[in-house]
Image (spheres, grey):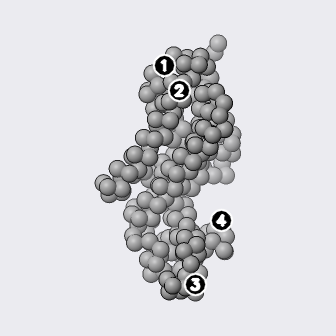
Amino acid sequence: MNPSLHSEDAIDEGLLWPATQHSAQQREAKRQAVLSAAAQLFNERGFHATSLDDIAARLGVSKPTLYYYVKNKEEILLGCVRQGLQLMLDGIEASRRDGGTALDQLTACMQVYARIVTQDFGMCLIRVGEEQISAPNRAELRRIKAEIDHEFRRLVAQGVEEGSLAPCDPKMTAFVIGGALSWIGRWYQPGGEYSPQEVAGHCLKTLLAGVLRR
């Protein structure tokens, strides 16, 4: 079993009571353990190279146990990607509530984005993506992604208006910011030379200040 999964988060096959006795909270906690283990494996091995047997082995349970919580591997991936997107939306909404100038909010949103793509669900969102998900579910994920993109566009446009950002095309600038921050999820390695905070700091400095000497 992966040492990063605490014993209280792991699935105990002895707790698979009938639905009338098994509380929704307990079931959701165990489903969350499935998603967490799967996200780690998808990031390590890739979606196609990870089987349900691998996920069950990571959790220390039998494969049939997984079917109590998920239908198939696509449902697991969908859950992982949804969580990565929801973390971003929640962080962006929190930044908006904190207020400040457009630049303050944009910087906070960028920090949230950079931090989440160094976490299991965020990395899974970037490394595996939506290509393995069926069309109806893919449409839902693209809608959520569009919300994030539009928030970046809005803040860039406001930043230009308030004078804190140089004149630019908000759409193109939002694409550049989102693309650069997303790519962190491709190359970041936990336990590497830089901490998530250092990675975010370096990337934000480059994106906001540029590379030209003034």
Within 10 Å of disc 4 (Cα), the crowding (few <14, some 14-19, many 20+) is few
Between disc 4 and disc 2, whose residue precedes?
A: 4
The amino acid type found where label 3 is placed reads Leu
Examine the rendered structure and indicate whether residue 159 appears above or below residue 128.
above
Q: Secondary structure at mark 4?
A: loop
Q: Quadrant where the N terminus lies?
A: bottom right
Residue under the image location 46 percent in, 35 percent down: 150
Between disc 1 and disc 2, whose residue precedes?
A: 2
Q: Is label 1 in contact with label 2 (beta carbons under 8 Å)?
A: yes
State whether residue 30 appears in this view: no
Q: Quadrant where the C terminus lies?
A: top right
Examine the rendered structure and indicate whether residue 136 appears above or below residue 93.
below
- In three-dimensional space, the C-alpha distance between marks 1 and 4, rounded to whole angstroms, equals 44 Å
Residue 132, image x and y in percent? Answer: 36, 56
Q: Which residue is mark 3?
A: 15
State whether residue 56 appears in this view: yes
Residue under the image location 65 percent in, 34 percent down: 99
Q: Secondary structure at mark 1?
A: loop
Q: Is label 4 in contact with label 2 (beta carbons under 8 Å)?
A: no
Between disc 3 and disc 2, whose residue precedes?
A: 3
Examine the rendered structure and indicate whether residue 80 appears above or below residue 93.
below
Q: Which residue is mark 4?
A: 4
